[in-house]
Amino acid sequence: MSNINVTVWNEFRHERHNEQVKAIYPEGIHMAIANHLSTQEGLDVHTAVLDEPEHGLTDEVLARTDVLLWWGHLAHEDVSDEVVEKVRQRVLDGMGLIVLHSGHASKIFRALMGTNTGALKWRDDGEKERIWVIEPGHPIAKGLGEYIEIPKEEMYGERFEIPAPDELVFISWFEGGEVFRSGCCYKRGLGNIFYFRPGHETFPVYHQPEVLQVITNGVRWAAKCEIAKVSYGRVAPLEPVR
């Protein structure tokens, strides 16, 4: 069986302009994730960032990518509509997509969900987050206990303006009492999509082993829907998700 080709995409803006974030992720959030994934058996990992030509997501890159991870926050609107459409079509054709943290407001997630905003409640007070595993038998929850506890995180709370997930794997609880659907699975066309909530840039969330385990599991789950490589560009275009 061939390896899973993974592309980790990141704006890479906070880490270059915010000293606090740079201290946590000196090479960028994308590299913290990619460095971990590169240690996992059967994964070939590459990275791409916003300020590269075509945001690093050329036709060649997308053609070889089985699973794309997306982290964005400051510059959602700087992502070109042309690249978003290429990524959207690639997901419909079978590429897996994992959207992390504030990527809920990215153009690509909104396009695939059919929602204009992905609005939610939020508060950045560095609260404890407990991510409850509500589907322990799901492949994305493999190797986890009853919950993951993150000592300090940004709070996201309901109501989260997204379509009802096809599968809900995690629900978060915060010290302020809010809850949040923090591990949501979808199918769009032939592509699997996983939204995973944690990952605010001012906390070392992507250094936490349990969080990285979820991302690794998510990559393997998202790749299961990938059709044969030769099919890219040969599948009849699917109608846009409305």
Image (spheres, rainbow, N blue to C red):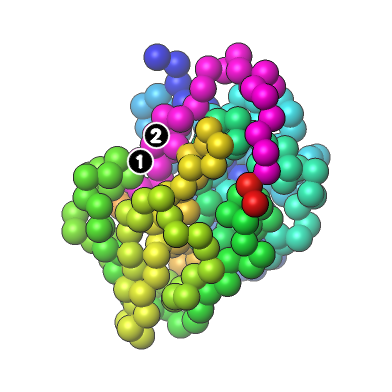
9 versus 131 height, above or below? above
Q: Distance of mark 1 from mark 2, alpha carbons? A: 5 Å
Q: Is residue 225 left or right of residue 69?
A: left
Tell how many labels. 2
Residue sitting nearer the eye, 2 or 14: 2
Task: Residue 217: give its label.
Answer: 1
Q: Where is residue 38 in the image (x, y as percent from the top left)?
A: 45, 33
Residue count near mark 1 (Cα–Cα under 10 Å), binned few <14, some 14–19, many ≥20? some
The span picked out in magenta is: 212-240
Helix, strand or loop for disc 1: helix
Q: Residue at x 53, y 74 (%)?
A: 120
Quarter of the rendering containing residue 118: bottom right
Name the residue at the left extreme.
Answer: 146
78 versus 84 height, above or below? below
Kind of residue indicated by mark 1: Asn
Q: Position of residue 89 (x, y in %)?
A: 67, 36
Mark 1 vs 2: CB contact within 8 A? yes
Q: Residue at x 45, y 59 (%)?
A: 164
Q: Mark 2 points at which residue?
A: 220
Kind of residue indicated by mark 2: Arg
Helix, strand or loop for disc 2: helix
